[in-house]
């Protein structure tokens, strides 16, 4: 299968979004690169990251980038290589905790995605389907994630929503968004 330049896979926790993204990249026949945004800030997260590495196996080249995602994507994206970014919502969390300008960083990511030398599959949690949180930081996170998802979905060639391990095409590679 040929990957389009930009694919966005959205879904809730344990929806199958990462497994879907991995299958797309591996099925493309391209060199698979896993660009992880998670930070091992506690023992549970360290164990989770290690478990995910073991489950992926040796087929993947794994890189970690918690903050400078646009720059790292420009470095690693190349013809013959499929890059999987997992995940945008962790990246947003990292930016917020580092008190970086989230909107400006999101714009830099969108700009980078428009000119990559190879295909990228982005994974992100769809967090806007539940109730609005009571805490200001949680509401700000929800707002940032929703805006970033809209911008990336507008430029993406393929957008899928995962639920219960099933993929729903929101935007197909052969259909163009006119808005």
Image (cartoon, helix red, strand yellow):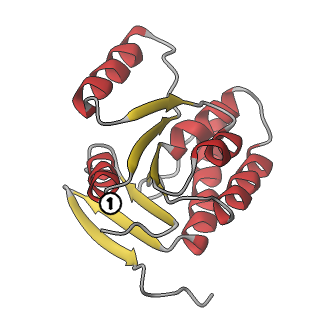
Number of other residues with Cα within 10 Å of mark 1, as a class: few under 14, some 14 to 19, many 20 or more: some
Q: Quadrant of the N terminus?
A: bottom left
Residue bearing the label numbered 1: 28
Q: Is residue 135 visible?
A: no
Q: Nearer the viewer, residue 55 or 76?
A: 76
The image quarter containing residue 71 is top right
Identify the residue at horizontal 80%, vertical 41% (top origin).
101
Instruction: Find residue 144 and report its horizontal and vertical position in percent.
Output: 65, 51
Which of these two is toward me, 44 or 142? Answer: 44
Give x and y (percent) for residue 100.
Answer: 78, 35
The residue nearer to you, when weighing 4 against 117, is 117
- The residue at the point 48 percent across, 42 percent down is 87
Which residue is depicted at the point 69% across and 53% down? 109
Q: Is 124 on the left or on the right of 55, as rendered?
A: right
Query: Quick check: 78 above or below 36?
Result: below
Task: Indicate the position of residue 153 as horizontal and vertical percent values.
Answer: 54, 69
**x, y percentage for residue 52?**
30, 28
Residue 17 visible in the picture: yes
Residue at image position (63%, 59%) is 116
Residue found at the far front of this picture: 80
61 left or right, relative to 140? left
Whether residue 163 sits left or right of residue 98 in the image: it is: left
The quadrant the C terminus occupies is bottom right
Q: Nearer the viewer, residue 63 or 150?
A: 63
Could you say whether the residue bearing mark 1 is in a helix, strand or loop? loop
């Amino acid at each position: 299968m040929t990957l389009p330049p930009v694919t966005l896979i959205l879904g809730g926790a344990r929806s199958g979004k990462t497994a879907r993204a991995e299958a797309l990249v591996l099925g493309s026949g391209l060199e698979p690169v896993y660009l992880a945004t998670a930070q091992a800030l506690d023992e549970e997260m360290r164990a989770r990251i290690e478990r995910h590495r073991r489950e992926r196996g040796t087929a993947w080249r794994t890189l970690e980038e918690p903050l400078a995602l646009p720059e790292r994507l420009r470095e690693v994206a190349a013809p013959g290589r499929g890059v999987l970014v997992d995940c945008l919502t962790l990246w947003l969390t990292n930016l917020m905790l580092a008190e970086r300008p989230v909107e400006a960083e999101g714009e830099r990511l969108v700009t980078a995605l428009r000119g990559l030398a190879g295909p990228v599959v982005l994974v992100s949690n769809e967090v806007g389907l539940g109730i609005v949180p009571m805490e200001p930081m949680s509401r700000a996170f929800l707002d940032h994630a929703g805006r970033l998802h809209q911008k990336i979905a507008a430029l993406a060639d393929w957008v899928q929503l995962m639920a219960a391990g099933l993929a729903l095409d929101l935007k197909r590679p052969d259909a163009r968004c006119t808005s």
